[in-house]
Image (tube, rainbow, N blue to C red):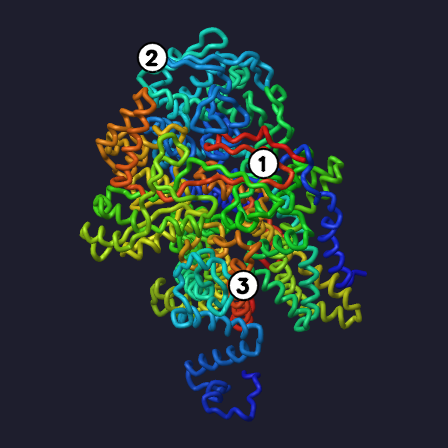
Amino acid sequence: MTSASLSRLTGVAMTLFGLILVTFLIGRAMPIDPVMAIVGDRAPPDVVARIRLELGLDRSLVEQFWIYLQHLLQGDLGKSVMTGQPVTRDILQFFPATLELATSAMLIAVVIGVPLGVLAAARQGSLFDNIVRVISLIGQSLPVFVLALICLLVFYVKLDFAPGTGQQDVIFQGMVPTITGMVVVDAALDGQWDAFWDALAHLAMPALLLAYFSLSVIARMTRTFMLDALSGEYIITARAKGLSGPRVLWRHAFGNIAGRLMTVLALTYAGLLEGAVLTETVFSWPGLGLYLTRSLLNADMNAVLGATLVIGAIYVGLNLLADSLQRRLDPRVD
Amino acid sequence: MLTRRSLLFSAAAIAAAPYFLSESAQAATPKNILVMAAAIDDVVGGFDPAEAYEPASYDVCGNLYRTLVTVDPADPTRMIGDLATSWDVSEDGLTLTFQLQDDLVFESGNPLTAEDAAFSLQRVVKLNLAPGHILTQFGWTADNVDGLIRTDGSRTLVLTLPEIQAPGIVLSCLSDLCGSVVDKVEVLKHETDGDLGNNWLKTHSAGSGAYRLVEWLASDRIVLETNPNAAVKPAIPRIVIRHVSDPATQLLLLQKGDVDIARDLGSDQLKSIAGNPDFTFIHQDTLTLMYVAMNMGLPELQKPQVRQAIKWAIDYQAIAKNITPDLWNVWQSFLPKGTPGAIDDNPFQKDVAKAKALLTEAGYPDGLSLTLDYPVRWPFSEIAQAVQADLAEIGIEVQLLAGERKQVITKMRARQHQLAMGRWGPDYIDANGNAVAFCANSDDSDTSAVRNPSWTNHFVDPELTEAVNAAARELSAEKRLETYAMVQRASLERSPYAFLVQQANVAVLRKGVSGLSLGVLDNYTRYSGIQKV
Amino acid sequence: MSTYPVTADSPAPLRSWLLTDSPDSRRQAAWGGAYRRWLQFRRNRLAMTGFVTVVLLILAALAAPLLATHAPGAQDLARRLEPPSTAHWLGTDELGRDLYSRLLYGGRVTLGMVVSVVLLVAPIGLAVGTVAGYAGGLADRILMRITDVFLAFPRLVLALAFVAALRPGVTSAVIAIALTAWPPFALLARAETLAIRKTDYIAAARLTGASPARIVLRHIAPLCLSSLIVRVALDMSGIIMTAAGLGFLGMGAQSPMPEWGTMIATTRGYILDQWWVPTIPGIAILVASLAFNLLGDGLRDVLDPKQE
C-alpha cells in the first residue's frame, strides 16, 4: 500500500469518526425523552429512573459515546426501541428496498440521460439542445414530492395505469422468499413471474420519478464534458480525416469523457439515497429513508444513529470511489 | 445503428412495459385475504401485551389475546366474562376470585389454565413497562405479586389487593390489554436473560384470540392468520394491515379496491364519500379527548378568570362543525361520553364579551400573550390555528409552537409549556383513571411520584384530590357516580383544562365487507366477525 | 478587446466610455468588464428569463401587503377549499384562507429563508476555504476534515436530524440548511485560494509586509467572490428545494406561516378532490427554483465557465 492511499484511508476513517460523533450529539440533543418511547407517557418516576439507568443515560456524554463506539466496533448498533430488534437487523431488512429503488433509478437515468447529453452537445445551440436543457433544469427545480403526488394522481387515480403505493400487491406479500431482500430480484430468482411483474410495476413509477432527478444532472454533466471533448484537437483531426459523425461522437469524444462521467455517476448515485427519503415517504416504500424519518420522530436514537451512519458511510464510500476513479482515469488530476 | 429515435423509444418502452404486463395484479383483493389500511407507524416495541401501549398495537393485540373479563359490545359500560365464567368480590373488597372456562387452548395447543392467568398478570407487574402502572396502582409490586396473585386449582384465580379498591376499577383494568392471558409454557421457552419472554413476544403471539401474529415489518405491514386453536374460527383466514399514514391515500386505495377497510379517514375524506352506497360506515365513539392544557406555574394562568376567559373564548361548535365533522364532537367534561358517570353539561360556548370581562377582572384589560404547543398532525394543527384566532379576539396573542407529538409531551412532562394541546385516552373504562389524572395531585414538587396532567399543569386542589381518592375506595357504585358528577362540575369551574372535543372512530368498509366491531377503547376492537362476499 | 458590435444607433457616450479598448483608469476597466459581461448575459434568453423572474418574485414578495387581496392568516372556516373565483383568485385553503395572498406572503418566507441561508453560508464557506487554502498545513487538514464530515451526510438527512434536535420551525430550518450547505462553498474558496496564492500579485503583497489576515481579507477573498456568486446562484434552487422538503416532512416552517413547502404538506391530502390547493404552491416552488437555476446558469457562462 502506498503512503498516499494510506493517508487517504486515515482520512476516510477520520471522516467516519466525525460522522459518528455529529450524529451521536444530534441524537442526544433531541427534545424527545427517549425513555418515554419505551415506557409511555404515564409511567411513574421510579420506572422512568430505572429505564434511564438501563439506557445508560445517567452517564456523562463522553462515557456514553465511548460505550457506543466500543459496541460499534463489534458491529453492534444497539437495539431499536421502535421495532424491538437489533438495529443491524433492521437495516438489513430495510436497506434492500432502498437499494432496489436507487439502483433501478440509476439505470434508467444513465440509459436516458447520457445519450441525451451526448446528442445535445453534438447539436449545441439547436432546438434539441435547448429542449434537453429545459427538461433537465425542470428536473432540478421541481421538488420530487410535488411530481410524485401529481404522478400518483394522474397515473394511478385518473388513468388507472399504474399500481398504487407500496412495494407489492397484498396477494404476493410473503410469497416471495427473501434472498437478496430486493423483491424484484428475489421473485425472478425464485421464478415467480406473476410476483415479478407485480413488483416491477410497483417499482416503475417511484424509480422513474427518482430517475428523472438524477437524469437532469447526468444529462447536463455529459453535455458539458462532451462540449469540452468535442473542442479537443484530436476530434478536429479525426473529423478532418473524414471519419463519420456518429463514429467521432461516440468512439472518440465519448470514449474520452467516460472516466469523468463515471465519477459523476458515483456521486449522483449517492445523491439518489437522499431523494429516496422523500420518494419513499410519498410511495410508502419500506426502505431506509422511511425507517430513518420514522425513527427520528420516535426519538429512537439507536435507529437514527445506525441509519444515518449507514447512509453516511455509503456516501463516503461512493465519494472515495469517485475520487479514485478520477485519479485513475483522468491523468490531469494530481 | 443506434439512432436517437430508436434509443428514446426503447427507453420509454422499457419503462412502460411493466404497466402493460401487470394487468392481472390490478384486480381487487382475493376473498381469503382482508386488507386493512391503517396508520401503524406508532407501534413501538411490538406486540407483547405487557409492553404494548400505543393505539395501533392495542387494536391488533386485542385480536391475539383474550382477557379474564371484557366489556359488553352492546353496552360498553357493562363488564362480561371472557375467559372467566364468573367472579366474586369479597365483602371487604380485598379479594377477587375468578372461575375460568373449561377446555381453553392456546394457539400452541397448550391448555389455558389459571396458572397462565396468574403468570400473565405477575409478568406485567414484574416487567413494569409502559402499561405496568395500570396494575401496580393497586399496590402490587414485583416483590409481593407472587403472593397476592395465586391459583386455587387449575380453574380458579384469586387476586388479593393490598388496599381497598372499587371493584369497577379492578375489573376494567383486568379487561385492558395488559390483562391478556399469555401462554406461560410457550413464553418461558423463549425467555432470554430473565426477560420473561418479552423480547420474543414483541414479534410473536402466544394467546388464545381469534388470530395469531405472522409478520410485522415496522411502518409497513402487520400480517395475521387464523389461530388454529381459536374457540370460534373467524371467516377470514388472513388479515394484512398495510401502513398508510395519509388519510387521502387510504381513501384512494379503498376506492380502487386495493384495500377492503380504511381505518383513519379524516373528515374531508368522509365527506367526499358520504352517502355513497359502495361503502359501509362503522361509527363508534371512543373515549379519547382533546384538550388545551394551561400551565398554572405561569402567574397569568394561575388566575382563575384567565383560565375561564380562555374557556369562554373558544368557538367549540365551529371547530367541530367545520374542521372535524363526523369525527370529533364537542365535549367539555374530563369524563368522556360513554364512561359511567360522565356528565353532558357542555356549558361553554364562544362569548367574546364575557371572556373579555373575565380578562379585565383578572387585571389584563389589554390582553396578554402566551405560547401554545401542539402536535403537528391533523386535526391538531388546524384546531390550534382556530384556537389562536379565537383567543386573538379577546386580546390573547398566541404564538404557536409546533412539535412532534412526543416532543410536546416531553415538554409538558417537564412543565415547560404555557398552553399545550393534548390528546388523552383513558387506560381503562372506569371513571377513576381520568378523575385521578385530571384532579388528583397530592404532591406538586419536582420530585413527586405524581406524574399526571394535574401535576404537569401545577393544578393543586385538595378538595378534589380527596374526593377522587375516596371514590376509588368506595364500594358502592351509586355513591361513586355522585362524587364524579360533583368533581366534573367543579373541574369545569376551576381546572386548567379546556376540553374541546371527543373522538369518534369511523371505519369505512368496501361493499361486500362487513362485521368489523370497533371498541370504545382500541383493545376492544374485534376482527373476528369480518366477512367478505 | 471588445468583440461586441457597437450599433450605429447607440452613440451614448457612457456606452463608448464603458466599451473603450483603452481605459484610462482601473475603475473604467472594471466597469467596462462588468458591462461587457452584462451584454453577454443579456444575449442569453433563458438566463434573462430567469433574471427577470427572480426580480419579479422579489418585487412581489416585497410588495406583498400591497398586492394581497386578503390577510394571509384570515380564516373563514365556512369557505374552505373553494376553487378559484373573483373573490379568491386562486381559491382558498383548508382553513378558508386566501391562497393567492398566502402565496405572496409565502414568497417572503421562502425567499427570506434563502437569503438568510446564503448570508450565513457564504461568509462561513469563504472564511473556512480561504484560511485553509492560504494557511495550508495542519490548519488546512483539520478544516478540510471537518468539511468532509459535513459533506459525508446527505443534505436532507442531516438537515432533518438537525431540525429534529432543535424544533421544527423557520429558524431551525435555516440553521440546519446552512449547516449542510456551507461545505461546497468552502471547497470552492479553497481551490480558488490555492490558485491565487501562488500568483505574483500575492507575493508582491507579502513583500510589502502585509499580514496574512490582511492578505486573505483584502486580496484573496475579493478574488474568490465571482465564482462564489455563481455558486450561490446555482445553490439557491437547492436551498429552496431543501426548505420545501423539510416543510413537506413537517420539519420546516409551521402553519400558519405560509411557507410553500409547508402549504403543500398541510394540504397534500386534498390533491384528489381539490388538486389546485397543493398544486399551486408546488408551481410556485417550481417557478422560483427554475428561475434561480436559469439565472445561475447564465451567470456561470459569463463569470466562471469552469464551474460545473
The answer to whether residue C279 is above or below residue C152 is below
Q: Circle 3 is placed at which residue position?
A: C283
Please name the amino acid that badge 1 sits on. Ile
Residue B403 as seen in the image, left or right of residue B515: left
In this view, the residue in front, B463 or C285, is B463
Q: Are marks 2 and 3 in contact (CB under 8 Å)?
A: no
Query: How would you rate the neighbour count of disc 1 (Cα within 10 Å): few for under 14, some for 14-19, many for 20 or more?
Result: many
Secondary structure beneath label 3: helix
Please name the amino acid that badge 2 sits on. Glu
User: The disc numbered 2 marks a residue on which chain?
Assistant: B
Q: Circle 2 is placed at which residue position?
A: B91
In this view, the residue in front, A264 or B56, is B56
Quadrant of the drawing holding the N terminus of chain A: top right
The residues bearing labels 3 and 1 have C-alpha atoms spaced at a distance of 35 Å
Please name the amino acid that badge 3 sits on. Ile
The answer to whether residue B389 is above or below residue B423 is below
Residue C137 as seen in the image, left or right of residue C269: left
The quadrant where residue B31 appears: top right
Mark toward the viewer: 3 or 1? 1
The residues bearing labels 2 and 3 have C-alpha atoms spaced at a distance of 72 Å
Residue at screen point 76% across, 70% down = A239
In this view, the residue in front, A15 or A287, is A287
Marks 2 and 3: same chain?
no
Q: Is residue C199 visible?
A: no
Secondary structure beneath label 1: strand
Q: Is residue C63 visible?
A: yes
